[in-house]
Every structure is written in structure tokens, then in C-alpha cells.
């Protein structure tokens, strides 16, 4: 089965491998910035042997928020407010098409999510793909307290010169949490709990 994605194949391979490594960890799987659900269906397919876990997907479905100063980059001119619009129905339809279990889909700006009502209590694996500084910073703050021992966070675009806000948010988070292990694989930032 092949899927289209905003993420390169070498990155998908890493995501699948790290998700498998966290399969014995207690807690659900979350993706912040699911867009049309292409990486989401990859996560869901790999979770089929972990039927006790839910997949939670988050997106504004209104596209990207405004950039802040931390996101400015000549190379990233294509990433504009309102780009990458999708819909929850589009994502739900994709799951049906591939006969995958329904995910929990939350339509909201990340900074409007309630950590208790809108997120699972425990998380084993988080994929953060919100592109911009505030989006990555907010999603890190939401998921970090829920990550279980052995759990992993993967952050996209850490090495992407078009989206410098991603690395800035990750580096600030790591400075504030020096006990956590940080790795890079195929340009993806990986934080081990
Ligand atoms: C690059 S796309 C995600 C691509 C997807 N992970 C894939 O590989 O198919 C980034 C998504 O993040 C969402 N997003 C970015 N910042 C957000 C925020 N602060 N709140 C809600 N959604 C946000 C955008 O709407 C967009 O759909």
C-alpha cells in the first residue's frame, strides 16, 4: 500500500521504526498537524497490532496560522497564513478508504486545546508537524507532561531551512528539559522520555 505525504519516504521509515519501538509503552498516539491525514493513515496502519491504543489527530483545518518573527526565512516564502487547508471529513474518508479504525479528530488551534478534555491522559508516541514556532512550542507543552517512560516525540522540519521556527521551539524546550535525550534521524528531531 502506498500513501501520498508531506513527509519524505526516508522520514516515514524513521517514523514507522520509532513508533514500533514505542509499541510496548503505555499510552495513545497523537499527531499535531495532520493536514489531509496522509501521515495519520501511516501511523494507523502501523498501530493495527496495538488495538488498545487510540490515534488522536489535531489540526485547525483552517491552514497555517500567521508567522511570527521566529518563522521568517527567505527560503520559506511559500508557507503562508491559510496555506494547507483541509477538512476533518477528508481525513475521516481516507481512514474509511484504507479500512483503518476511526481516529479521534479534534479541529482546533493548538493553543485553544484543553489538556485534560482534548488530549489523552497518557501518550506513548507524538508526531509534531505544525511547521511554525508557536505551533511546535504549544504542541510540545501540551504533550510533554503526558509522555510515559520510553515514549517518543518526533518533530518534523528540525533541519528544514524553510521552517526555522521548528528547531527554535525544540531547542528552547530541550534547554528547559536537559534531562531528556535528543537524537536526529533523517532530519527529524526525536526526544526520548
Ligand atoms: C505540514 S502540514 C501537516 C502534514 C501532515 N503531517 C502530513 O505529513 O501529511 C501542517 C498542518 O499543521 C496545521 N497547523 C499548524 N499550526 C497549527 C496550529 N497552531 N493549530 C492548529 N493547526 C495547525 C496546519 O493547518 C497544517 O494542516
Image (cartoon, rainbow, N blue to C red):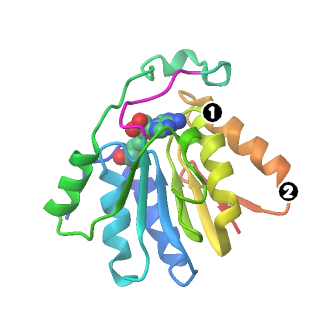
Q: Position of residue 129 (x, y in %)?
A: 49, 45
Splitting the image into 4 quarters, where does residue 135 fall?
A: top right
Mark number, residue 56: none
The residue lying at 41 percent from left, 71 percent from top is 54
Category of crowding for the residue at label 1, using alpha-carbon neighbours closer than 10 angstroms: few (below 14), some (14–19), many (at least 20) = many
| SS category of the residue bearing label 1 | helix
Mark number, residue 178: 2
Vertically, is 44 above or below 108? Answer: below
Q: Position of residue 141 (x, y in %)?
A: 68, 49
Q: Main secondary structure of the magenta part?
A: loop
Q: Position of residue 161 (x, y in %)?
A: 57, 29
Vertically, is 127 above or below 160? Answer: below
Please give the range of residues in magenta: 60-67
Instruction: From the image, tell me which residue sits under label 1.
Output: 133
Q: Position of residue 163 (x, y in %)?
A: 56, 30
Vertically, is 90 above or below 135? Answer: below
The residue lying at 17 percent from left, 69 percent from top is 99
| SS category of the residue bearing label 2 | loop
The answer to whether any part of residue 78 appears in the image is yes
In the depicted view, which residue is nearer to us: 12 or 106? 106
Splitting the image into 4 quarters, where does residue 72 fall?
A: top right
Vertically, is 101 above or below 182? Answer: below
Q: CA distance from mark 2 to mark 1?
A: 20 Å
The answer to whether any part of residue 14 appears in the image is no
Quadrant position of the N terminus in the picture: bottom left
The residue lying at 56 percent from left, 21 percent from top is 67
Going from N to C along the chain, the mark reached first, 2 or 1, is 1
Residue that protrudes farthest toward the left in the picture: 97
Amino acid at each position: 500500500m502506498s500513501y501520498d505525504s508531506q513527509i519524505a519516504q526516508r522520514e516515514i521509515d524513521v517514523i514507522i521504526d520509532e513508533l514500533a519501538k514505542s509499541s510496548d509503552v503505555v499510552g495513545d498516539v497523537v499527531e499535531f498537524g495532520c493536514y489531509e491525514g496522509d501521515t495519520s493513515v501511516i501511523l494507523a496502519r502501523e498501530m493495527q497490532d496495538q488495538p488498545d491504543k487510540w490515534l488522536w489527530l489535531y489540526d485547525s483545518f483552517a491552514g497555517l496560522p500567521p508567522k511570527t518573527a521566529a518563522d521568517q526565512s527567505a527560503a520559506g516564502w511559500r508557507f503562508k497564513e491559510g496555506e494547507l487547508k483541509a477538512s476533518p471529513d477528508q481525513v475521516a474518508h481516507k481512514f474509511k478508504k484504507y479500512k483503518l479504525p476511526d481516529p479521534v479528530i479534534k479541529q482546533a488551534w493548538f493553543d485553544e486545546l484543553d489538556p485534560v478534555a482534548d488530549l489523552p491522559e497518557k501518550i506513548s508516541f507524538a508526531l509534531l508537524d505544525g511547521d511554525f514556532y508557536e505551533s511546535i512550542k504549544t504542541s510540545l507543552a501540551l504533550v510533554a507532561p503526558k509522555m510515559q517512560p520510553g515514549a517518543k516525540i518526533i518533530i518534523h522540519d528540525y533541519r528544514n531551512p524553510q521552517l526555522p521556527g521548528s528547531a527554535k521551539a525544540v531547542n528552547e524546550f530541550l534547554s528547559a528539559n536537559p534531562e531528556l535525550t535528543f537524537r536526529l534521524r533523517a532530519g527529524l528531531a526525536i526526544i526520548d522520555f
